[in-house]
């Protein structure tokens, strides 16, 4: 079958606009043929557990699921009783971009905190960590952070450790939405466990899709005392894949060597290149620090509208017109340079209009 799309075309809308890394597709093909026990009792899922343990420690256990929203819902539900609640940044994906799934599907109360940069701190957690023992208040139980954050910023290992220490002192658990934990670790040049297990995180949603998988994320329980019933909850939330070998083998291919790191480094480097290429173009204002694979900018006039006809990307904040440009594992230097040149052209055109 010939492709129905032009495989040379790249967008800057999201890292999940990218296709599948060839090494992942090869791994899926290698796992094909013959029969394997369904629902996760296959040899690929067993091998995947060992690979997760190598990265996250001997007590880590991973449950593959279909998408990131589900990884978050299953993680948070496994960490909370019905009367308990989750503290998160107002900008957190679980609060802004999951169609209400944590509340509607998971039945989980979110206690949100406004933040300047998408990051919680011990002080910001305290804005919602109160009312313990008050039957009128949903009881705070989990602090959920994202690394990288939805605003493209990073938590360092020390910042996560400080959050975990504070949360644990209050009797709270810590969940990390690691949809882009690979980008964060690559940017900080630290192992994945430095931003999770070693810092005291209890449960991690590990992201695979945005870093080159066909599909697949994982609930990774780092502290076995922090979560209950994940086996059952995964099925309850319709996330138990029958042909699980094809999800598991993708994680093995991603994490057994350095594919995750190569992909994350490339995506991050391309965002840096993009920021450097556009920051001095008159009219472009970079709106946030570029710390991993996202670039946020404000453009004058209708430049964004015009540019969008050539490259797809999203408006992040309708009220300010701020746009977000994401780089993926397959973004090339030529893609970035072509995008920057198109942006400069559209801005010259905008200028000429006035
Ligand atoms: C930080 C973060 N968490 C979770 C998700 C959810 O992933 P999915 O779209 O696979 O449900 C995303 C997706 O964009 C994300 O950016």
Image (cartoon, rainbow, N blue to C red):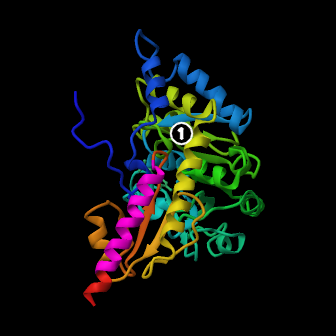
Q: Is residue 326 visible?
A: yes
What's the residue at 74%, 49% (across, down)? Answer: 194
The percent coordinates of residue 86 (x first, y second) are 57, 61
The percent coordinates of residue 199 (x first, y second) are 75, 52
Relative depth, front residue between 190 and 110: 190
The percent coordinates of residue 122 (x first, y second) are 71, 69
Q: Is residue 21 left or right of residue 48?
A: left
Q: Is residue 196 above or below residue 249?
A: below
What's the residue at 54%, 32% (across, down)? Answer: 251
Q: Is residue 10 left or right of residue 75?
A: left
Q: Is residue 198 above or below residue 138?
A: above
The percent coordinates of residue 72 (x first, y second) are 51, 50
Q: Is residue 334 left or right of residue 171?
A: left
Query: Where does the magenta region start and end?
Result: 331-349
Whether the magenta-drawn stretch holds residue 335 is answered as: yes
Relative depth, front residue between 69 and 132: 69
Relative depth, front residue between 6 and 26: 6
The residue that mark 1 highlights is 218
Q: Is residue 147 above or below residue 262?
A: below
Whether the magenta-drawn stretch holds residue 223 is answered as: no
Magenta stretch, main secondary structure class: helix
In terms of secondary structure, where does tag 1 sit? strand
Among the 4 quarters of the image, the one containing residue 34: top left
Mark 1 Cα within 10 Å, few/some/many (few <14, many 20+)?
many
């Amino acid at each position: 079958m010939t492709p129905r799309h032009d495989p040379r075309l790249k967008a800057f809308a999201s890292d999940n606009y990218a296709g599948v890394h060839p090494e992942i597709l090869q791994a899926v093909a290698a796992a094909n043929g013959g029969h394997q026990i369904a629902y996760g009792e296959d040899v690929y899922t067993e091998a995947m557990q060992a690979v997760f343990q190598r990265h996250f420690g001997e007590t880590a256990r991973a449950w593959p699921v279909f998408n990131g929203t589900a990884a978050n819902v299953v993680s948070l539900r496994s960490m909370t009783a019905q009367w308990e609640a989750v503290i998160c940044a107002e900008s957190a994906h679980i609060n802004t971009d999951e169609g209400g799934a944590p509340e509607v599907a998971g039945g989980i109360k979110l206690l949100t905190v406004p933040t300047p940069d998408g990051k919680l701190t011990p002080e910001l957690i305290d804005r919602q960590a109160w009312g313990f023992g008050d039957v009128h208040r949903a009881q705070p139980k989990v602090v959920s952070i994202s690394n990288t954050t939805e605003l493209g910023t990073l938590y360092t290992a020390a910042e996560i450790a400080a959050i975990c220490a504070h949360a644990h002192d209050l009797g709270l658990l810590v969940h990390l939405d690691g949809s882009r934990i690979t980008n964060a670790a690559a940017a900080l040049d630290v192992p994945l466990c430095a931003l999770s297990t070693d810092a005291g995180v209890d449960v991690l949603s590990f992201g695979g899709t945005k870093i080159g998988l066909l599909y697949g994320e994982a609930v990774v329980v780092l502290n076995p005392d922090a979560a209950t019933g994940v086996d059952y909850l995964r099925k309850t939330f319709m996330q138990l894949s029958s042909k699980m070998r094809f999800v598991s083998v993708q994680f093995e291919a991603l994490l057994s060597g350095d594919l995750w790191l190569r992909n994350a480094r490339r995506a991050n480097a391309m965002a840096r290149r993009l920021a450097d290429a556009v920051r001095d173009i008159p009219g472009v204002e970079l709106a946030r620090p570029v710390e991993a694979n996202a670039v946020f900018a404000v453009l004058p006039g209708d430049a964004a509208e015009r540019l969008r006809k050539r490259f797809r990307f999203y408006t992040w904040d309708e009220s300010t017109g701020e746009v977000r440009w994401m780089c993926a594992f397959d973004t090339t230097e030529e893609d970035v340079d072509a995008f920057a040149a198109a942006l400069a052209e559209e801005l010259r055109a905008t200028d000429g209009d006035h």
